Amino acid sequence: MLSAAPTNIATRDALLSELIVQVTGFQVDSESFLKCRRLAKKQIKVHRWQTTNEHEVIRQYGGLVEKFAVYSQDTKADTLRKSLNSLLSLRPSYHFLIHDMLRLFLSLSEAPLRNIYHPCIGSMDAESSLTWEDITAEEPLTGSHWEDATDEVDSDDGYSSDESTKVCDSAVTLKEPVADRQPRRQKHRNPDLLSNPNESSQKELERRQYWTREKGSYSLFAEDISFDHQDPCSLAPSLASHQQRDPRFFYRPAASTVYTKEVDFVRECLFLLSGFATAVFRSRSDGSFEPVTDVTLKHLSEGALHDLLQWFADRGTAVQRVRSFAESVCQSEQIAYPLTVQAFASGLLSIVRDFDATITKEEKRFQEYARKMPKSGQQEVTSLMALGSRLSGKLDILDDLSLMLEALEIEKNEPYRDNATWTTQILSAQCTSIRHYEHTCQPVKVSVFVELFLRTMKPYMDTIQNWMDTGKLDDPQEEFFVASSNPNATGDEWQSRYILRESVTPNFLTHVNAAIYVCGKSLNVIEQLDASQVFPELSRNGESLYEATVASFIEGMGMNRKMKKRNEQQPSSQYPSKSTGTGSEIEQMFPKCFRALISVGIDQMDAEDATIGVQFEQQHLWQSIDECFRGAIRRHVLAQKASVGRHLTSILFRKCELNDHLKSLQAVYFMTAGAVMHPFCLKLFEKVESRELCYEPHALNAAFAECLASNAGTELNHLDARCFDIRLLNVEGRAAKSSSRELLDAINIHYQTPFPLNIIVTPATIAIYNRIARILLAIKYARHCLDTDDWRGRKATGTSNLLLARQRSAVKARLMHFVANLHAFFLSAVIHAESKTFMEGIKSAQGMDDLILMHDTFVCAVRDRCLLNEKASKIWKQMSAPLELSVEYASLCKKYDPSADQTRSSDYLRDVGVQSNERDKQFAKDLKQLARRVEESVNFVKKALEGLASHGVQHLEALAASLA
Amino acid sequence: MDSKLQEARETMDILHEISRILNTSLDRETLSLCVSLCESGVNPEALAAVIKELKRESRALRGENAS
């Protein structure tokens, strides 16, 4: 029949008519028949299909066999495979016909997975056997073995107790009367069905099972199937629905898909992750990858496959980004990247190399499966899902690194970014990531990022160490947060030569950046003072700052140093570090215990036992890594800073005579050197009153030098008159017209502080010293005025004079009480107390910053306790009123007292037109007014001070009581 | 001649088996007609479309008659 070759159209039409009758059952020449024939002829004559592609057909049948196997329909798979082999072994002349027929079957096929198929006897291997193990391994009540009739029933329920007992194959007993099987299935079958034990009942029984719920005649890719929400787990309608609705495949040309095996996709994914070009993934313009859609699998919907491949594409993009960055930095010869960036790239490269080694292992595993699979005839074991689950841990890490790089790369394009900013961002981003992973309990990621962070920070820590050990900036790429503002500056070495850039300080150094900055600056000062002396002390026992910090960090994390030493004896790490040039150092000094922990921890990710990560997590449960690391850095930085500070303090006291200078300042400005300052003040007041000062501005310096010289050989030897320059400020042109008080307020004492003491005694503190000195001068002047009014030696001639003398005495006593107590308070309660505390505390200073702080605190404390700060200016104005009244009192006495200055007094009285006999009355009247003003002023001051004291300023309570 | 006949019969058996596995709903006679039509040069996809159309027409007419 097959050899016959009908060639004419009439024969074909006849065959078509027969087919119509056979399929439809219509009568020949009926209207329906004619209509169908017309339609069939037209469709056969004009159609859109191409000739059969043999390879395509064979591929599709291969996929179908695979699909049957996947769905555990081995009978169908085996029969189909054998049938195809038999067909294809026929004579080649049949092949075109056979492929056509196979294609016809594919087109007519309806849900072959749902079809219940019973093989005929000839198509099955009669020798195949089945055990109870096979039966129980399958779904209940399915499979051809349920058609068996086993006579060897040894129990009441009709089942054999021996699972290894061979049962006959279904094909052998398929025609056995169903009635014989009835007793065995009595407990499991519906009685209705038992009464009609034929194929329909079998189908009904199958239909009622939950895994073969009736769904209608679904075809896998039928176009008219809608998704059934009542049965979402059904694969066929799900796939069909997905296929229909997925816009990614809607407009794809027909017949443009190449079917391949999953093992090929696995291979392509491995290629992608290794950084090679693949056929399944294509590269976009932005460097990312996406899966192509013209290669697909037979057992996955294209959407599902696309989603699966997209995951690999995203991870491949991440790996490629990390790999490209690391290689571009490490292999760049033209661009001089910052050392920290190079170290970071080196760390990334080592992670990528580690990942490449993992990929190599996967390839070996993949090749083993590929070799074994054809021999064993098993289903493909290597799958995309399995590959993804094995690599997901490391790929997640690389994905995170890629995101970090992406953020850094975006910022790299900012025009204002310099090396310091870039370095800071890299270090800070890693530190932040570690903190994040620690808080989210991801110990393996913590381990990897800690390792990377420790590698990255090595050059930065070396720069810090160089700065802290020598005071020199070894920072060619300008990454460090300390920068030299003007290398040739010789002025203020402390404040202006080096600057601290807070904005480019990595976040794990923000708590010690000031200490690092001060330490280096202190070394610079030491070098300038004592250049020939080598700084003797290092607080790290010969270790570098990086080594010591890492060791302390490891100790802080609760790890055993023995473990470190043991690991140090092991072969060095495989990490390349070509870029930094310090690779060997890193490898030698890198905490091997950490490395061991990390390597094992990562490898454990795809193993069953991940105890290493748990161990790591438990070790830092009570102290965060961030805190531990900051503590390790703080410990060494502060130790070094304290050591340098002590040395500098010692030099300042020993060589620069800091103590003597501070005493000199207090002796002059606070007038504690009474032997010198008292005669000097008398001369000063004399020159002020005589206005001689206005015409001889340098007379004060000469007077001071003279007073100082008269005390030579005493304990005031440290006072050097050359350091002081006393002159009037801001009174040029109006000095002669100024009052004595204004002249005293214009006095300024300049102290020439030598380097490096000018760092401590700054112009700002000298200004405060001057302010206090002027107040003391005002008090002394008031007291001087009261003291010079000496009328007690003269006799009172009359009653009025006696009363006047009493009145005068009362006012003077009141003023003297106020001035003397105020002076005593300033000197005793404020200046001496604060000075004593300061001079004792300064001996324990730990460096320049301590000295500056303590001195500033001392000066400000004296100023504030004397109520001379801005906030207390109104109080001080009231307090200074009795001082002015004292001067006024003295002036008044001179005006009315004939014994004081007869000429001036007579002139004055003549000028005002007061008669001589009335002057006592006028004097008494003025004194009375003055006494009232004094009383008001003192009472106001007392109340104000008591008010302040009630608000917490305790020391003013005593002052108020003493002034009242 | 007998061997060719036997071979043709075996081929038909195999095709029918595959047809059953794929659930094409083709009986032996229809299958023979399909083989003959394919031998005569009819495109199998077009033939499959015709068979599907015929089945649909038949179902439609039966449905009309039943109603």
Image (cartoon, rainbow, N blue to C red):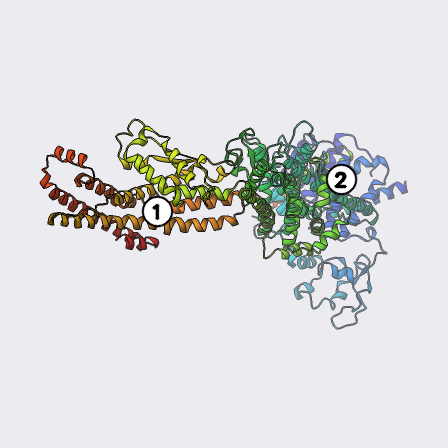
Residue type at the position of mark 2: Arg
**Which quadrant would residue A955 be assigned to in this image?**
bottom left
Which residue is disc 2 drawn over? A59
Secondary structure of the residue carrying tag 2 is helix
Residue A376 x %, y %:
82, 50
Residue A832 placement, left or right of A590? left
Q: Chain of mark 2?
A: A
Subunit bearing disc 1: A
Q: Earlier in the sequence, mark 2 or mark 1?
A: 2
Q: Are marks 2 and 1 in contact (CB under 8 Å)?
A: no
Q: Residue at x 20, y 49 (%)?
A: A809
Nearer mark to the viewer, of 2 and 1? 1
Mark 1 = which residue? A866
Which numbered dot is residue A193?
Answer: none
Of the 4 image quadrants, the one containing the N terminus of chain A is: top right
User: Horizontal and vertical percent for residue A212?
Assistant: 66, 55
